[in-house]
Image (cartoon, rainbow, N blue to C red):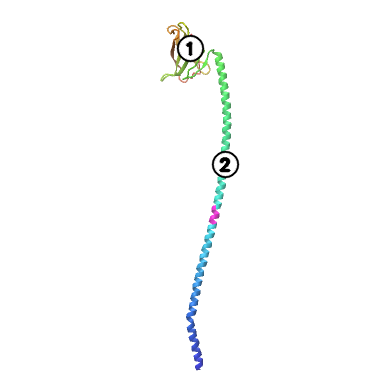
Amino acid sequence: MDKTAEFASGHVSRSTASAPGADQRSSDRRRRGSHGEELRAELKVARLQRRTLAITTAVMFLACGSLAVWASLQQSTLRASVNRKQEQIVGLTKQLAVATTALEESRLAVDSLIMGRIPGLLPFRVNEPISVDTPFVRDLSFKPAPPPAFGHECKLVIENDSNSEIRPALSVVLFDDVGIELTRAQLMDGIRDELRADEIRSFFASLEIAEGSVASYFLLTSD
């Protein structure tokens, strides 16, 4: 009996003595397990972040590619539109050149017809000297009449390059674009307006026309 009790007592004592070491190992295992769970959680988060980054990068590349394709299509459309506009401009320019040529030819034909019907008729121009084939006339010019008058003022420059006195009688007549007379005025009466030898003088006349009328030709006549 004594030996059995002693054995039991010794066993209990060893069991009691070994309990603190077991607790330490269990605590270490728990700490390692907790640390492993933290590592697994961190790895999971890292994998999720990498996946998210990869998806975001792919979406960005896809968006950039789509934008590049759209820009290329827009550029092609714009280039085609510009080419069409340029072709239209070239075509319109050619049409304008043809129309301008035809208009000029028509204008020359009308001028020839009207001037052939009225000998000595000349194209009407303003604010520039005009040479005429009339004895003693150096040039003449027209300018718009000052308001409220509607029409033109004529200036005639006469040069007497002869050796005697002259008394020319000259008038100016305005016509519209079909050769209809609009108005006329006398520049020199042939009686009072004399020029001595080598004298140069200017003469003036006012030419009033109906409002809305347009002078296209003129005629300098010797009365």
The quadrant where residue 119 appears: top right
Neighbours of disc 1 within 10 Å: few (<14), some (14-19), many (20+)? some
Residue 77: give x, y in percent of width and height. Answer: 57, 41
Residue at horizontal 50 percent and vertical 70 percent from the top: 35
Give the residues drawn in magenta, as a range. 55-60
Taking depth in this image into account, of 28 and 80 the one nearest to the observer is 28
Which dot, 1 or 2, sits closer to the camera? 1
> Closer to the N terminus: mark 1 or mark 2?
2
Residue 37: give x, y in percent of width and height. Answer: 51, 69
Q: Which residue is mark 1?
A: 137
Per the image, label 2 sits on a secondary structure element best described as helix
Q: Which residue is mark 2?
A: 77
Would you place residue 92 above or below residue 30 in this image? above
Examine the structure image and report whether residue 56 is included in the region drawn in magenta.
Answer: yes
Q: Amino acid at mark 1?
A: Val
Residue at horizontal 58 percent and vertical 29 percent from the top: 95
Neighbours of disc 2 within 10 Å: few (<14), some (14-19), many (20+)? few
Numbered label attached to residue 155:
none
Taking depth in this image into account, of 206 and 130 the one nearest to the observer is 130
Residue 59: give x, y in percent of width and height. Answer: 54, 54
Examine the structure image and report whether residue 1 is included in the region drawn in magenta.
Answer: no
Residue at horizontal 58 percent and vertical 32 percent from the top: 90
Per the image, label 1 sits on a secondary structure element best described as strand
> How far apart are the two marked residues, 1 and 2, measured between alpha carbons?
66 Å
> Residue lying farthest top?
164
Q: Amino acid at mark 2?
A: Thr
Residue 62: give x, y in percent of width and height. Answer: 56, 52
- Please tell me whether the stretch drawn in magenta is mainly helix, strand or loop: helix
Would you place residue 20 above or below residue 154 in this image? below
